[in-house]
Structure formats: structure tokens, C-alpha cells
Image (spheres, grey):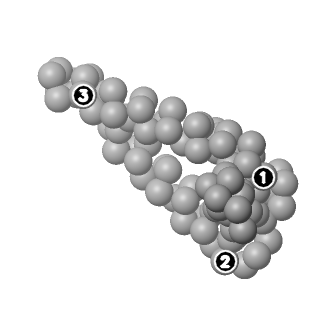
Amino acid sequence: MTLFNRIFHEHPAAAGESYFEHMFFAVGFSRRLMRAALAALAHGFVPSLCETTASSTVLDLNEELIERRAVLARGRVKAGEMIHDA
């Protein structure tokens, strides 16, 4: 396998996705993580702000990853089967 294929195609293919499907999922996931990080930062300075935003987001993302990995383990990943971003 060429270096290009290993870097850009091996992991998305293992997840049952194309490069762009995987990219959109990862970008959406990172956007949600950044929102949680900013909420936690705001909460750190003003405790009455964003009291549960970061923890709720992290718990939701964890559930989503557990479901995603279960689908991958069953080998049922198809285009459109997974929820890419809520």
C-alpha cells in the first residue's frame, strides 16, 4: 500500500467510510468538542455559566462513539447508517 493510501484511506476504510465521510464526521466531532471546551472555560471563570454544557456534551459524544464502535464491530457500516452530527 502506498504512503498516500495509508495516510488518507486506510483508517476511513476501516471505519467503513470514504475519506470525505470520515472527514465530515471528525470535523463535526471536533466542533462539538471545541464548544464543550469553551463552555468549560467559561464555567471555570463564572461558575453559574454553562453548568452542565461541557459534561453533557462529553457524555453525549461518548455514547455516540460507543454506538459507532458497536456498529463497526458488527460490520454494518454503510453510507448514511451513522448519525454524523447532531
Which residue does the numbered mark 2 point to in the structure image?
73
Q: Residue at x 50, y 38 (%)?
A: 30
Distance in Å between CA atoms under marks 3 and 1? 34 Å
Q: Residue at x 17, y 21 (%)?
A: 46
Q: Secondary structure at mark 3?
A: helix
Distance in Å between CA atoms under marks 2 and 3? 35 Å
Q: Quadrant of residue 79?
A: bottom right
Q: Is residue 19 above or below residue 74?
A: above
Q: Residue furthest bottom?
A: 74
Identify the mark nearer the N-term, 2 or 3. 3
Which residue does the numbered mark 3 point to in the structure image?
41
Q: Which mark is residue 18?
A: 1
The amino acid sitting under disc 2 is Ala
Q: Residues within 10 Å of mark 1 (few under 14, many from 20)?
A: some
Residue 57 appears in the rendering:
yes
Q: Secondary structure at mark 1?
A: loop
Mark 1 or 2: in front is 1
Q: Residues within 10 Å of mark 2 (few under 14, many from 20)?
A: few
Q: Secondary structure at mark 2?
A: helix
Residue 45 placed where, x, y %?
A: 15, 22
Identify the mark nearer the N-term, 3 or 1. 1
